Image (spheres, coloured by chain):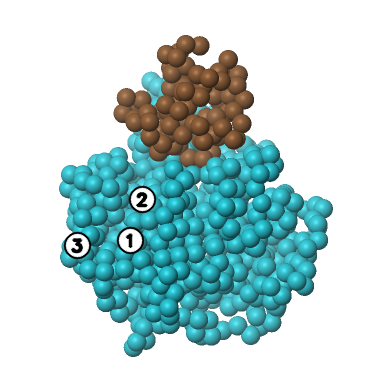
Chain colours: A brown, B cyan
Amino acid sequence: MTQPDLRDALIIQLGRIAPEIEIDTIDTAADLRDEFDIDSMDFLKLITALADEFACPIPEADYDQMRSFDEMLAYLKVHAK
Amino acid sequence: MSKAFGSKEVIRKTAEVRDASNMRDYQQSYDSFSWQEAETLLAGLPGGHLNIAHEAIDRHVIAGHAEQIALRWIAKSGERTDFTYGELSRLTNRFANVLRSNGLTKGDRVYALLGRVPELYIAALGSLKAGCVFCPLFSAFGPEPIKARMEIGTANALVTSTRLYSRKVAGIRPALPALKTVFTIDGDAPDTLALQPLMNVASDQFKMAKTDPEETALLHFTSGTTGKPKGVVHVHQAVVAHTETGRIALDLRAGDIYWCTADPGWVTGTSYGIIAPFTNRCTMIVDEAEFDAARWYDILSSEGVNVWYTAPTAIRMLMKAGTKVMEPYHFPALRFMASVGEPLNPEAVIWGQNAFGKPFHDNWWQTETGGIMIANYAAVDVKPGSMGKPLPGITAGIVEVEGDAVTELTTPMTIGELALRPGWPSMMRGYLNEQARYDKCFKGGWYLSGDLAMRDADGYFWFVGRADDLIKSAGHLIGPFEVESALMEHDAVAEVAVIGLPDETAGELVKAYVALKPGHIASEDLRLDLLGHARKRLGPAVAPKIIAFRQNLPKTRSGKIMRRLLKARELGLPAGDISTLESDET
């Protein structure tokens, strides 16, 4: 997937968990859980959905590389298949 | 300590573990206990006055412990900031002075809507010093729960961040005429005061408000099955119970490194995440970040945590994360682990035993009880899955309520309502402005908890379920009515019922059944629209995680939606008495 595709796909997944948040209104470099108002349970749900969507297992140890929207996108860029 | 082999297996405590605990002989302590004696652990103020903040902070400074670290704050970035008891004393004095200079006087309500940042703890204790009533709100609440809680409690001041203010408070501010002052901790927002410059010029000396033991100190909100949330009133005298229960149920000692993972927006995070650790002169760890398995193991290990108080949802998420994440860490300092929020399943207790070499000690209490009432203790054998035995000073029973008659059920393992004999110091003194609802909690000399439970022949209590429709998700009590009301505001919704669906991690998840008005068609887009609508109003902690469409919801003749029937069907359980069912689910 190209970067714009990845970005759109990530926005769709986030939209399934926090549909009320408009991507233009958030700070993509800030804490993702704050920006999207997602709790720990939702965060794990998101990770599972991303791992399925992009066919890349995301180990627990990598979660701290996915703190913001930008970081998550960068991570997926490297790992997504 | 013996190894546990299954849920029926009792985890026995060795003589060594028992002798090293604060309460070595449970039965002897239970038999000889008096709250008057517990009160002697505190300093008090001249003239019979009592103030929680004095017991938590200033008396330790007077006793020569100003240099001890009271609070170690771990920012999301991982950066550590320490506050000694001396610093906390001065900062809370400054905050109390800021309140005074902005016209806030004794009895005024100061709310906080903040993440776990140092200002929250300073505001809590500073408000108490000023004799104000402190009310913490969970920062994951949306505008509707915030508005309801500020209206009911008549909030006079709010401490928040510019971000939370603009997102959640600015829009509801016109509906809150009593809210005169909003302090923001991180700069300016319209119609607010920046806190930091005010703190900088305030004096660090303050004369502690002479509060009576029975004066209101804290306001915590809890959900009702119907109607609005209830404002639970707690008084300064509660500190006697906070201190004593921290000592015997959490085994807290002066100098301990202690970590309570609960947010102060919930009662656990205040009673045991602010007050009890400070009154017992512990060093308290506060982590700003949300749950993360590797981060949590790192904190437990690198901070040398001695006592850890957490929740079943978190423990189950740690179990799910697997042992590999845990491998690099060791916990030689960890002495006692406890859990609260919902019943801890036996597997999780045993997982703790295998992973840490010690079990999680489940305990039970409520917003209304203000402190731990039934617990597993350091020196008492643990039956995995049981909430343990009543604390010294607490009489608990299993009762049957019929009309005005309350009968105690003494046959072991009989299901009934868990009830307590009133009179302990941290018992709620009322539901704010709701005398009738408060009175309903007491009958036949018992406080009725609304929880169903059993007591076994050895005196251990076992949780069975809620007697009402309240939902327990990730340790938080959620009222279905509050969720239903928010969904009903959506244009497409004709009727809605909300239940708790069992979930292996969160205990229960909020599930909403929605019937649409004519002209609206169930679709994935509409489902997401409803979800977004609910999250916007309620926030992620209260909004449903699952939304299902129905043509019609099961109702009684009087039009009341039968949540219980929906739940029974969802779980494949017997429907029970459906004689009042008039219009069924389709």
The circle drawn on residue B114 is 2
Q: Which residue is drawn at 30% across and 79% down?
A: B210
Q: Which quadrant holds the N terminus of chain B?
A: bottom right
Label 3 vs 2, first from the N-terminus: 2
Q: Where is residue B473 shown, x and y percent of the image?
A: 54, 46
Is label 2 on the same chain as label 1? yes
The circle drawn on residue B201 is 3
Mark 1 Cα shell of 10 Å, populated few (<14), some (14-19), many (≥20): many
Distance between mark 3 and mark 2 Cα atoms:
23 Å
Q: Of discs 3 and 1, which sits in the foreground?
A: 3
Helix, strand or loop at mark 2: loop
Vertical arrangement, residue A45 with respect to residue B510, above or below: above
Q: Is residue B473 left or right of residue B229?
A: right
Q: Residue at x 60, y 35 (%)?
A: A60
The circle drawn on residue B123 is 1
Distance between mark 2 and mark 1 Cα atoms:
10 Å
Q: In this view, does B288 lie to the left or right of B260?
A: left
Q: Where is residue B468 shown, x and y percent of the image?
A: 54, 53
Residue nearest the observer in this picture, B45 or B20: B20
Query: Quick check: can you spot residue B403?
Result: no
The part of the image, by quadrant, that contains residue B202 is bottom left
Q: Which chain carries label 3?
A: B
Is label 3 on the same chain as label 2? yes
Helix, strand or loop at mark 1: helix
Q: Mark 1 lies on which chain?
A: B
Residue at the outermost bottom position: B47
Badges 2 and 1: C-beta atoms under 8 Å apart?
Answer: yes
